[in-house]
Image (cartoon, grey):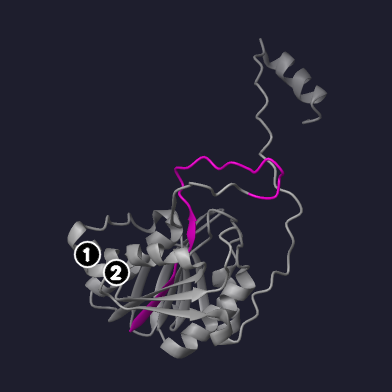
Amino acid sequence: MKVLVPVKRVIDYNVKVRVKADGSGVDLANVKMSMNPFDEIAVEEAIRLKEAGKADEIIVVSIGVKQATDTLRNALAMGADRAILVNAADDVHTDVEPLAVSKILAKVVEEEQPGLVLCGKQAIDNDLNATGQMLSALLGWSQATFASEVDIDGDAAKVTREVDGGLQTISVKMPTVVTVDLRLNEPRYASLPNIMKAKKKPLEEKTAADYGVDVTPRLEIVKTTEPAERAAGIKVADVDELIAKLKEAGAV
């Protein structure tokens, strides 16, 4: 069974994001970029499936700018077998929208015929949480979102997913699209020998036009602003004062 894992190049989660002075977007000058953490977990899970003998090949694909090559090489160093880079944007500030990404991924799936697509549940730059669900709809496949545990058994996948009320365990028919959550696993670090080997692994470059997909944005970002500063808290002497303050704030 082939496993396809989409990965995205995002600002490293340790970096403090700065908004441009004119509010036109986020400042990416001299900012460290890395693989989306949720996607990294998906890559790790695919590798574990292969190590357990439940997967034969792991293909990672990134859709965006040329610089995403580094992200793909990192996934290859972790243990993926080959990579596909789909050049869909020239400007690093351009974020390819989930619908366009899903349409391209659907074309990739048609070509590669994987038995499982493992996605991060969302990207930490836009938090849209939509690509996996859209891909499932386009393919007509089953889906399991927010997975904290995945077990492949023949033609079905048993997935434990995190929901508001706790945990929910479902069984979905293969092929399927699974989006992974933070508690699924702890991604491994790429060793130096594997980093060197990754340079020789296949990395195919394509464009959105090769798949016949229009990536023209449907949305326009009008303005980007910093989050509002958190207001200072206050201390109260007793419950009566607490209730009075809550009434003043309109909370009760």
Q: Which residue corresponds to the image point at 49% horizontal and 89% vertical from the top-left?
A: 110
Q: Earlier in the sequence, mark 1 or mark 2?
A: 2
Task: Tell me the kind of residue under disc 2.
Answer: Ile
Q: How far apart in space, not on screen, are marks 1 and 2 (Cα)?
A: 18 Å
**Relative horizontal placement of residue 98, taking residue 112 as reference (left or right):** right
**Residue 141 visible to an observer of this rendering:** no
Above or below residue 19? Residue 233 is above
Dot 2: element: helix
Q: Position of residue 131 (x, y in %)?
A: 57, 69
Q: Which residue corresponds to the image point at 76% horizontal and 24% vertical from the top-left?
A: 246
Whether tag 1 and tag 2 are in contact, CB under 8 A, the answer is no
Q: Residue 245: name its quadrant.
A: top right
Residue situated in front as seen by the camera: 69 or 13: 69
Dot 1: element: helix
Above or below residue 99? Residue 242 is above
Residue 47: mark in rendering: 2
Q: Which residue corresponds to the image point at 46% horizontal and 57% vertical from the top-left?
A: 36
Q: Position of residue 169 (x, y in %)?
A: 45, 66
Give neighbour class at mark 2: few <14, some 14-19, many 20+ (Cα, 10 Å): many
SS majority, magenta? loop
Residue 196: mark in rendering: 1
Q: Which residue corresponds to the image point at 44% horizontal and 43% vertical from the top-left?
A: 14
**Relative horizontal placement of residue 101, taking residue 203 as reference (left or right):** right
Q: Which range of residues does the magenta coloring cover?
A: 1-25
**Relative horizontal placement of residue 160, taking residue 80 as reference (left or right):** right
Residue situated in front as seen by the camera: 209 or 237: 209
Q: Position of residue 70 (x, y in %)?
A: 38, 62
Decide whether residue 64 is among the magenta residues.
no
